[in-house]
Amino acid sequence: MPESTFLDSTELVLNMGPQHPSTHGVLRVILKLDGEKVNGTECVIGYLHRGVEKIGENRTYQQFAPYVDRMDYVAAVSNGLGYCLAVEKLLNIEAPPRAQVTRVILTELNRIASHLLWLGTHALDIGAITPVFYCFREREEILKIYENYCGARLTTHAFRIGGLQYELYDGFEEQTKAFCDMFLPKVDEYEELLTNNRIWVGRLKGVGILTGEECKEYGVTGPVLRAAGVKWDLRKAQPYSGYEQYDFEIPTGENGDTYDRYMVRMQEMRQSVRIIRQAVDKIPSGPIMGKVPKVIKPPVGEVYVSIEAPKGELGYFVVSDNSTQPYRLRVRPPSFINLQALDRMVRGGLVADVVAIVGTLDIVLGEVDR
Amino acid sequence: MGKLFRKIFLVDLFQGLWVTFRNQNPKYIYTEQYPAERPKVAERYRGAPRLNINPENGETLCIGCNLCALACPEGLIVVTTERNEKTRRKELTTFTYDTSRCMFCGLCEDACPVDALELTQDFELASYTREGAIWDRQMLEEGPKPTRYRC
């Protein structure tokens, strides 16, 4: 710990975490307190470091695909999509249309699942117990779709380089449509519980303000950036996997406070349902796997591909030296970069606000530490 | 007047209770009575590995090609074969699968050219010892036998 942490005697240093339920994992935040006021923070990360990038250098391209699921385990499908798109770009191939539409449906379902888990745990941090049960109940339906589709619920390994391994199962369209119909009224139900709740508004309004300019300085992406009023979504800005065919809006906030981030995520869930409905109606027939060699040996080169994961911009930088294994693999995790803004948001607030702000950043420590 | 009416007849209370009782419908009960009742997992579920045998003569389907061992990211499958001098064919001698390191990604299943290795719907893999998690050929062919409880 640097010496600057211990300033004069009126300051109190408090360790929050790594075993603290509201840090959503093993994040340790050293708080410098003046009474109840936070004068500064320092994040200590790395408790969950598994060296995923180094593992990537020692595995073939196909073999590394299951490992990316374990970074952001709440949104494993999005991670898989990002990695597969990066290697596909390196190989200069594209997944067939049927695979692309299926990928869009599954990643959007994953966005909903991730936001549901965020909403449940965030509300739990603030003190509302009920939403977590409701959210997990609906998340279960999404996990059932995953289980039927690829045989796993959390670390799915649903996509392969060049397309998909599994054909859609019988009743996939019906189950997805039934979920969409069931889900929209449920979002209203969550809003009924929280949006105008006095405690909820009191705890969130004006807490942890991050303006658009500050977001850009820190490189913050995802719902946190959009809540500050910046209309930036990679699905619109640089469409991948055929996102340009779908009609949806980018929800934005105004003030960039915790309450706006909540509203943005609620709207995003509705927009995801909208995308899923459009995609399910037009799943084309055809092959699900492109022409991919059995042994993947991409030409020498490097590639950076980023997608809009539920938490922000998720990028994969892959360097190939024409062997079966990547020469270097670097991940740009959204949680890690969003976490930088914690100090800026917490400064001047109260200790109780730290819990709200860590929750609203929607970090997953598996992704922060990799 | 309306406010007084609401106060006397506890309208708000009943409104709140209605939300509670609306969710008491047995249709919305999601709790599983495990282990008395086992959940039915999906057909494609990736659980315990199994080495399939030919049901007619009990011979293994595995041809000992070693592709699963090469496909495995963790390198946890060990296949040994012996060449039969009479038929000039490779025959499987041992097959070891370390379930403690397995992440059930399904790559070995995809690699198998004869559908001998398969990830099944069995999901109870707990063991009292570390050695118990390393499955040999016999264990892989028979599958796990978890205790059945009756309640």
Image (tube, grey):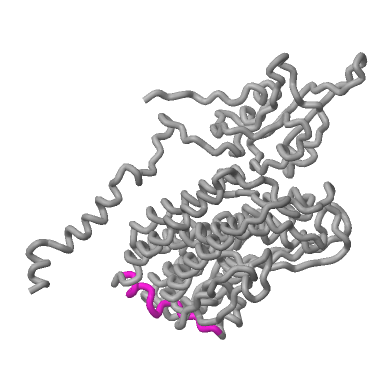
Q: Report the side of A309 relative to A306 (left or right).
A: left
Task: Answer yes or no: is residue A39 visible.
Answer: no
Residue A267 location, x and y as percent? 46, 70
Report the residue at 73% width, 57% height from top: A96
Report the residue at 59% width, 42% height from top: A151
Q: Which residues are magenta?
A: A199-212
Q: Report the side of A260 relative to B23 (left or right).
A: right
Placement of B26 over or under A20, stated as above or below: above
Q: Is residue A200 magenta?
A: yes
Residue B58 location, x and y as percent? 71, 16
Placement of A213 over or under A54, stated as above or below: below
Report the residue at 63% width, 72% height from top: A234
> How many circles with numbers are drawn on the protein?
0
Q: Quadrant of residue A368?
A: bottom right
Task: Answer yes or no: is residue A236 visible.
Answer: yes
Q: Quadrant of residue A50?
A: bottom right
Q: Report the side of B94 relative to A5 (left or right).
A: right
Quadrant where the image shows the C terminus of chain A: bottom right
Residue B110 location, x and y as percent? 73, 40
Residue closest to the eye, A243 or A139? A243
Residue B69 location, x and y as percent? 77, 36
Placement of A41 over or under B150, stated as above or below: below
